[in-house]
Image (tube, rainbow, N blue to C red):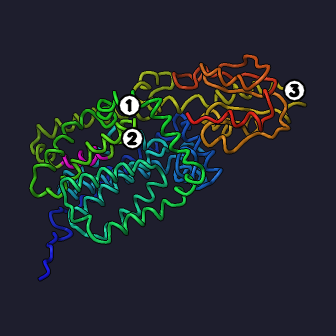
């Protein structure tokens, strides 16, 4: 006799979706991000994405292809400006807020809880930060939330076909960033530990994995044929920042999301673990510490685990909604929400004068990395103009890092500057200059990185860059050298560096 395993109806336990109020939150976030997107300027990573997008490939030494290609498409569609580029960041973050509300609904959160979940996401520091500018994390956040939402739906219903959606989302996420692999491992181990293990049986999990592998295959092939340079980059980042990341792991997660949300995600953990109606979702509680262990072991950054913490926050919005019935408690939550929004916006959005950014750079250094690039390019132009016109045809501009290279590539043409070169990350692959470039070299490097000068001859101190704030390029050197110690084809392999 065959035993048929009963499954809950697809809609069981789920309230209606608060489409109208959630839409108001989503549109409000999009309006704020759009209004502020032109302020300051391109971030150093955005400048790099724009250059990389001009060299389309299935992979780059430090990342898969999705973000550079999206950056190229965004500027083609919406304009080659910070505001034009950031349209996709705004839309992606708005979608992340929407999915957070859907996760609250998936976890039996009522309309009020769904709105609270959307608001919590919309005013959290993490979502605002990645929504203001284009980064790999911008798209990674949405992908992780989609994976969590689909995984919760799979665990709730046991519907094997949901593995197809998971496979598609994971595959696309791998084309953006490999970190989603940690999430997949954490969820797998959690389901094995606390269930529902039935979702791992049958052919659908295999089909889902194959779908993800097929989508990610072009980039994986590119990495394999190029010697897996991304592993080298990741190892360097871990070696440089791993100890600091481990020490700051817990406090920075609290700061990045918001201290005001700590009681909410703790309530979410308690609810998922104790509520008998949500027993099927316990794996999400287990997945979070497993993910944290994986991130800590690899020396990853604290924000890597934040999307799952946002899921737990969504789970805690139902207890919050019940707690706020009554005017006094609603007022308390409203005041806390306003304070949370103000603190998050001040640290993550371009609200302060650039001269005052040092006050927040310690928490969010990405603020400072959006200013000073035109000043740097002007300093390069001043040194370039010092080269006799007859020698410029054989002269080269060489930048130490991809931010400097991207800034000169973006703003240099208005100063009459040629295409610059750099040995940093994938910039290396778009060189070297021809050996016929035997003339002077305008050398750009950060303060304290004088070792780069050993490959050049006759260097004399030129300009120092005043970015107007305390960031990585403040005090950068722009020197004028007579040439290189050997032909470019000989020197070039020594100039490659990943970090």
**Residue in front for this viewpoint, 410 or 281:** 281
Start-end of magenta stretch: 308-317
- Residue pictured at 37% horizontal, 51% vertical: 27
**Quadrant in the picture for the C terminus:** top right
Q: Position of residue 368 (x, y in %)?
A: 50, 28
- How many numbered discs sit on the rendered protein? 3
440 to 68, vertically: above or below:
above
Q: Position of residue 30 (x, y in %)?
A: 41, 48
Looking at the image, residue 218 sits to the left or right of residue 291; the answer is right
Q: Is residue 113 left or right of residue 327?
A: right
Q: Is label 1 in a helix, a strand or a loop?
A: helix
Alpha carbon separation for disc pair 1 and 3: 48 Å
Image side of residue 384 versus residue 1, left or right: right
Q: In terms of secondary structure, where does tag 2 sit?
A: helix
- Which residue: 47% across, 39% down? 36
Q: Is residue 8 magenta?
A: no
Residue 262 drawn at (x, y percent): 22, 36
Q: Answer with mark 1 or mark 2, whichever residue precedes in sequence.
A: 2
Residue named by callout 2: 128
- Up/down of 366 relative to 24, above or below: above
> Which one is in front, 150 or 214?
214
Left or right: 400, with 89 as reference point: right
Residue name at image x 12 percent, y 38 percent: 329
Q: Nearer the viewer, mark 1 or mark 2?
A: 1
Height in image: 181 above or below 416?
below
State the residue position of label 1: 245
Q: Quadrant of residue 95?
A: bottom left
As drawn, the residue found furthest toward the bottom would be 1
Looking at this view, is 484 or 1 the one in front? 1
Residue tagged by mark 3? 388
Q: Secondary structure at mark 3?
A: loop
């Amino acid at each position: 006799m065959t035993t048929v395993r009963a499954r809950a109806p697809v809609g069981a336990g789920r309230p209606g979706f608060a489409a109208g109020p959630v839409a108001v939150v989503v549109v409000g976030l999009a309006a704020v991000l759009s209004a502020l997107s032109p302020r300051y300027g391109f971030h150093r990573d955005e400048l790099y994405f724009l250059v990389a997008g001009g060299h389309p490939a299935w992979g780059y030494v430090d990342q898969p292809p999705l973000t550079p290609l999206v950056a190229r498409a965004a500027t083609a569609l919406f304009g080659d400006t910070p505001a034009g580029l950031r349209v996709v960041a705004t839309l992606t973050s708005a979608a992340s807020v929407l999915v957070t509300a859907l996760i609250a609904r998936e976890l039996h959160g009522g309309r009020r809880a769904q709105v609270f979940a959307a608001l919590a996401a919309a005013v959290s520091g993490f979502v605002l930060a990645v929504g203001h500018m284009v980064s790999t994390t911008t798209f990674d956040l949405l992908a992780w939330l989609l994976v969590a939402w689909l995984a919760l739906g799979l665990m709730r219903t046991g519907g094997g076909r949901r593995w197809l959606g998971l496979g598609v989302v994971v595959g696309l996420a791998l084309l953006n960033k490999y970190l989603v692999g940690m999430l997949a491992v954490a969820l797998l181990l959690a389901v094995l530990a606390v269930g529902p293990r039935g979702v791992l049986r049958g052919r659908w999990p295999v089909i889902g994995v194959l779908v993800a592998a097929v989508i990610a295959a072009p980039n994986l092939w590119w990495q394999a044929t190029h010697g897996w340079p991304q592993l080298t980059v990741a190892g360097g980042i871990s070696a440089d920042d791993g100890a600091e990341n481990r020490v700051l792991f817990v406090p920075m997660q609290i700061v990045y999301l918001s201290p005001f949300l700590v009681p909410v995600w703790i309530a979410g953990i308690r609810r998922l673990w104790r509520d008998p109606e949500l027993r099927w979702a316990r794996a999400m509680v287990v997945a979070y510490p497993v993910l944290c262990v994986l991130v800590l072991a690899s020396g990853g950054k604290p924000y890597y685990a934040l999307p799952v913490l946002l899921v737990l926050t969504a789970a805690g919005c139902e207890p919050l909604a019940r707690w706020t019935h009554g005017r006094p408690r609603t007022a308390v939550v409203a005041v806390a929400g306003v304070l949370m929004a103000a603190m998050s916006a001040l640290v993550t959005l371009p609200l302060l004068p650039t001269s005052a950014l040092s006050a927040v750079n310690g928490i969010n250094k990405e603020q400072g990395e959006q200013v000073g690039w035109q000043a740097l390019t002007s300093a390069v132009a001043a040194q370039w103009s010092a080269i006799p016109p007859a020698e410029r045809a054989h002269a080269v501009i060489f930048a130490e890092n991809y931010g400097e290279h991207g800034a000169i590539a973006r703003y240099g043409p208005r100063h009459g500057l040629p295409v610059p070169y750099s040995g940093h990350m994938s910039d290396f692959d778009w060189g070297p200059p021809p050996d016929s470039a035997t003339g002077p070299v305008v050398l750009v490097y950060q303060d304290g990185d004088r070792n780069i000068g050993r490959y050049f001859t006759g260097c004399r101190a030129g300009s120092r860059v005043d970015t107007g704030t305390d960031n990585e390029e403040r005090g950068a050197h722009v020197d004028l050298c007579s040439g290189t110690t050997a032909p470019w084809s000989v020197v070039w392999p020594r100039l490659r560096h990943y970090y």
